[in-house]
Amino acid sequence: MNIKQTNHSTIIEEIEKKFKKTNIPNIEVGDSIQIKLVIQEGNKERIQNSEGIVISKNNAQLNTTITIRKVVQNIGIEKVYLIHSPRIIDIKIIRKAKVRKSKLYYLRSRSGKATRLKLR
């Protein structure tokens, strides 16, 4: 039974390799990043830029996700992105911050200058 499990996992890894992106920078929690996305409106496609701080990262091979937080008109917005999604064109790291936690959920309760992070 153990042999079948390893055989299935190798088959899954082989399939996932086809869809994995190789041009992704090393994104860590606390980084300020900019993402270029393809958005479809009706029958037209356009590129939209999204910017924010990475507050969490979930490493799961092909299903690796990051949660980005930004404040727009005093309202906090969080969005989860699949890193290997074909809709994501480009990811740029703007700033790297020194953080000691793996999840920065405490930024939700802070506002203004209290949300600043120390640069690395």
Image (cartoon, grey):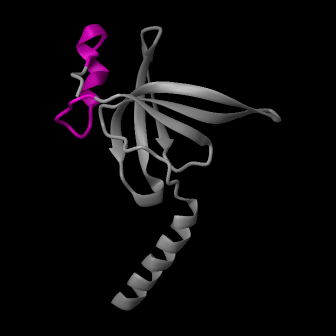
- Residue, far right: 43
Q: Nearer the viewer, residue 15 or 111?
A: 15
In this rendering, the count of numbered labels is: 0
Residue at screen point 52% across, 50% down = 84
Does residue 11 appear left or right of residue 30 in this picture?
A: right
Q: Is residue 24 magenta?
A: no
Whether 24 is drawn above or below 63: the answer is above
State the image quarter where residue 71 is shown.
Answer: top left
**Residue 48 placement: quadrant:** top right
Q: Residue at x 27, y 17 (%)?
A: 115
Residue 38 makes an appearance in the image: yes
| Residues rendered magenta in the picture | 97-116
Q: Is residue 8 above or below residue 63?
A: below
Expressed as whole percent of the image width and height from the top left, the position of residue 41 reads: 75, 31
Residue 99 on image: x %, y %: 20, 32
**Residue at the image position 52 percent from the left and 32 percent from the top:** 35
